[in-house]
Amino acid sequence: MKISIIFHSVCGNTYLMAKDFYDCLKKQGKEVSLYRVKDDDLEKWMNIFPVAKEYFDEINNIPVAGPEVMLESEHIIIGSPTYFGNVSSEMKAYMDGASIFWIEGKLVGKKLTAFTSSSNSEGGGDLCLQAINTFAQHMGMISIPIPSNLLTNKSFPAYGFIHYSGGLGDQRPDENIYTAIKKYTEIYI
Amino acid sequence: MKISIIFHSVCGNTYLMAKDFYDCLKKQGKEVSLYRVKDDDLEKWMNIFPVAKEYFDEINNIPVAGPEVMLESEHIIIGSPTYFGNVSSEMKAYMDGASIFWIEGKLVGKKLTAFTSSSNSEGGGDLCLQAINTFAQHMGMISIPIPSNLLTNKSFPAYGFIHYSGGLGDQRPDENIYTAIKKYTEIYI
Amino acid sequence: MKISIIFHSVCGNTYLMAKDFYDCLKKQGKEVSLYRVKDDDLEKWMNIFPVAKEYFDEINNIPVAGPEVMLESEHIIIGSPTYFGNVSSEMKAYMDGASIFWIEGKLVGKKLTAFTSSSNSEGGGDLCLQAINTFAQHMGMISIPIPSNLLTNKSFPAYGFIHYSGGLGDQRPDENIYTAIKKYTEIYI
Amino acid sequence: MKISIIFHSVCGNTYLMAKDFYDCLKKQGKEVSLYRVKDDDLEKWMNIFPVAKEYFDEINNIPVAGPEVMLESEHIIIGSPTYFGNVSSEMKAYMDGASIFWIEGKLVGKKLTAFTSSSNSEGGGDLCLQAINTFAQHMGMISIPIPSNLLTNKSFPAYGFIHYSGGLGDQRPDENIYTAIKKYTEIYI
């Protein structure tokens, strides 16, 4: 079973979450690949947001996903920063590219997991996750929610994993989210 | 595998959709039960809306679902009329009753299908279906979307089945929706 | 201008937020009334949730709103606990009662503010607030969002005020939320 | 009061709705401007979708909106095609450009109206309109819903105007939607 992680990241937080998924799945011996979506302004952002410098090279070296990645995968993990209660336009552009599969239902039955990075718990993260899940529904894909009993000491939205990165985007994903992703990937992917 | 259809219906349209599901699944030799949610005002509505008289007796004779119905079922089919872009309060009361299963995640992994009856295509039906799917996510249940290629001549929201019943609620579900439910239940339930 | 605060509260948190609104508006010399929605199980909850005892009497003494409260008010402030990414069924029942105003558009142009109490930042609070705002849209009411620049040190969802009450519901609304509500009511109500 | 209509259109339907708004407001003697959002693939789409040829030149000649258009306007009318229950990535890119106004709340209090073109009533149009309204909320802008009593013989989602363009996108907006936009703009803009 091929698993693909497809993310958009500017300041590095969504990328670090994507890497958490990648590392966990790899250690579990699963066939997993890591992709980013096209973002022509990555270098521009790096010069505007100091925090975006830290992982620029790493992100830039990750292959860009074409729509065929979704076709070839059985479980797709999509991560986007939360911009105004929705995915970023770069992630939406990637999603819109799936229109070639829509009429014939070529993605029907594939599984999906959503994650996002949001400045704080007031930033519309729930709605960003639901925008990813709504895309999945249109493709006939099946979203696998985060169960309430995943961890006893920490909870996540049912809609997907969320990391709060702070107003400057410099609060990095921590051990808690790694533990959660580890357990989720063990059981549900 | 036990399948349960749980609906709320006042004017009869959501009930007729529920019966379409029931009849299709029964003919396919599957183990299926039909339940309504508690509605103390059913008789009151019948006296207000002429169209509500037609199926009052039939609806009234269907057993009322308790929360244990969800626990005992592997696939749950939930139908509610669309009231202001959301489920009816009667259906929400049924959903809220699932709180006893939430902490321990007792419904995790069960499958869900949503359907609704809405006055017209401008009535917020999409959002009612998503309210059902959001409930499912909180319970760790997996919503099975309606694929774009289910039928070639008729389409439904990815989020679930919808029937437009007109301003007076007297346009009944027709052969088209029966055909769609027949094919969906054959493949996905 | 008549302002009405209409809330549903079990453990007291949504009630305390409602009181924050009431106290702020009263001090500003505005004409404001406080109502709860009907909840026949209030006493039952008190015996199940220890935290629900603390404000039971205070809540129980507040008058129950009929639908006419919305008709008579120019700005309506609605607060509900978040239950599974949506309002409580008790609040939904109150909303459904507004159907008598819908066809003739009798609530069109009135203003609305939403607030909620949610166990934690992973509890679907955003979606509960949007369920209130969606109801407002169906009634032709105008939701007044929480602007990003309301306070410099604290942020809230654009969709309404949210308080995180913890897993046991015993973390009470603090000074921060009072300050935010104070400033919002001064400027926008 | 400056009013700006900002749209994205590929097959011409959202453009025709935008023109309906423009024509109505102009006839009412109001100060209104028409803009499109940047779409580098407009020519590519024209060669893929036959229906996109018809209005390509007209659309192409309309000035592209920069973010300052929102700053200078008091009422902003945003229209996007519905792509998978959300706005198009081109419209999302325009919205993301408003981030420069977000922190200081420079768009707070401005008014917004949403509209969309969707293939059929099963295409997620409600959710696309809500994606526009959610963006408005994050900016502190006030969405003006479509009241239930706007017209007696035709209804629209409370969330904004919708036109169903058919599977091939060639069913053009008709007299009904013009009449609705005419009445809405007379009363609410």
Image (spheres, coloured by chain):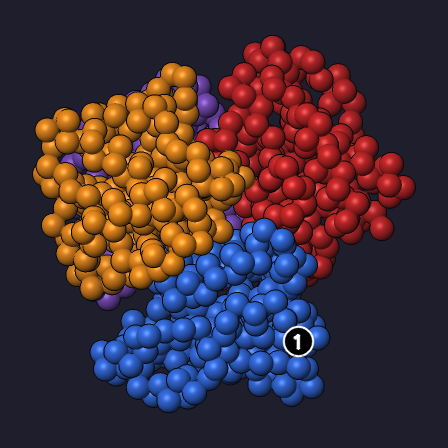
Chain colours: A red, B blue, C orange, D purple
Instruction: Please name the residue that numbered disc 1 is placed on.
Output: B2
User: What residue do we see at 37% from left, 89% from top?
Assistant: B57
Identify which residue is drawn at 34% across, 23% down: C175
* Image position of B185 (left or right of A179): left
Spot occupied by residue A90 in the image (x, y as percentages of width and height): 60, 32
Res B103 visible = yes
Crowding at mark 1 (Cα within 10 Å: few <14, some 14-19, many 20+): some
Residue D69 can be seen in this image: no
> What secondary structure is found at the residue carrying circle 1?
strand
Please, what is the three-letter code of the amino acid marked with disc 1? Lys
Q: Position of residue C10 (x, y in %)?
A: 36, 49
Q: Nearer the viewer, residue C41 or A64?
A: C41
Against A169, is B64 above or below?
A: below
C165 versus B78 height, above or below: above
From what the image shows, is residue B39 above or below residue B85? below
Left of B90 or right of it: where is B103? right
User: Relative to B40, is C86 above or below?
Assistant: above
